[in-house]
Image (tube, rainbow, N blue to C red):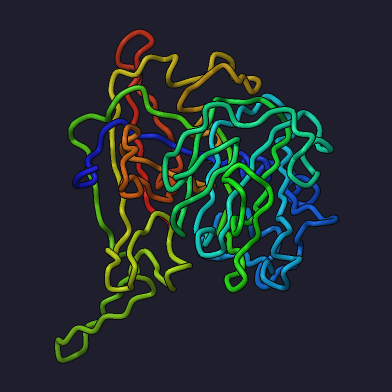
Amino acid sequence: MANMNIRTPKFYTDTINFLMSIGTAQDDNFDVVSGGDLITTYVTGSEAELFDMKPMNQVTFNTTASAGIQADHVLITINKQTPNFKTDYIAILNHNMNSADAKVRVGFADALTDVDDVDLANADNVMANPSEVVNADTISNSIVTPATDGSTIFTFDATDEQFIGLQFEGTVSQSSSAANDGSFDGTDNLKIGCIMIGEHYAMPNAPDLNVKRSIIYDGVNIQKSIGGNKYATASNLGRRYENSKNKSPFLLATYPSGVYGGRIAYDMKFSYLDSTNVMPSVWHDEHEISDTVVSDVWNRTKGNMIPFIFSSDSTDTGNKSETSHIFARFAQDTLDMTQVAPDVFNMSLKIEEEF
């Protein structure tokens, strides 16, 4: 996508953090599974930090300990609590799956015991019609292999299965991209910054033409001396590049000086939205057939509480599609919906990048 053009935006909101925000415990609901042939030893981080929405806070699994361990897997299970929450995307942010020679296998079921076994052998379903959004270059038999370290997003036909299994496994000496006989790299441990799952939402149309995009250096502080000289300090300069295997989501730079700094922000207005695209058909209960801004975006993020992935162009699926995505948060605590005609509304959204 040339010049980060703004077309029809898309939101990827996270079901896991939505559930935790309303009281669902992380432990026993979003877990790293233990057992034979499964890896649960951390070099850095913890189970909870896989879901902390801090992608630069990587969790490192000890996948290099021995040849036997390298042939084992990392299995993560997710309990959505109810089948009412549809799932049609998975995002793995700030990973080193290419360096660790890793891929991820996905399975769905209506019982936890069907997705907590090695190789997800008892899963009821696999991904239907999976598709790459960002860095999901090889997809085979519900297994995704990224081509590079970084962040990965892939979509699939929506499922209402309550339980999801994600198995990270090796690719070294595998017989095929769909096989389960590979091993992890012997040098680089598997690192994962954050896991998100949920239902993505594309706006019904592009925003009005007067979209404002800003690049903000809000971490820069200027002090002025008595003599009139100015001195600058910075608490942050924007996206971070720690090393080639640990960098902000959707950053493609291969060295620190290649990083564009600042915080990207959008201020956009959408006019003449049909009420069926704004509010769910019922307000008293989660209604899975209602795809609206309120039910699929604003309620899922609890306003400005929970970050999300934002794409300024939902049609961008090219080789540089990372360019159209940011890890973001709403920069507003109120969603104003102004009726301008019977059952027709205008609304404005303010979005700011997170680091």
State left or right for residue 74 relative to residue 312.
right
Can you say whether 75 is above or below 110 in the image?
below
Q: Looking at this view, is 252 or 105 the one in front?
A: 105
Quadrant containing the C terminus in the rendered view? bottom left
State left or right for residue 74 relative to residue 297.
right
Quarter of image, res 66? bottom right
Q: Looking at this view, is 22 or 48 the one in front?
A: 48
Residue 212 location (% of width, % of height): 22, 43
Residue 6 location (% of width, % of height): 25, 38
Number of residue marks: 0
What residue is at 34 percent from the left and 19 percent from the top? 273
What residue is at 76 percent from the left and 66 percent from the top? 68
Residue 274 location (% of width, % of height): 37, 14
Q: Residue furthest top?
A: 342
What residue is at 30 percent from the left and 48 percent from the top? 320
Residue 170 location (% of width, % of height): 63, 56
Q: Residue furthest left?
A: 228
Q: Looking at this view, is 85 or 293 the one in front?
A: 85
State left or right for residue 308 relative to residue 37.
left
Quadrant containing the N terminus in the rendered view? top left
What residue is at 34 percent from the left and 38 percent from the top? 317
Q: Residue furthest bottom?
A: 227
Quarter of image, res 90? top right
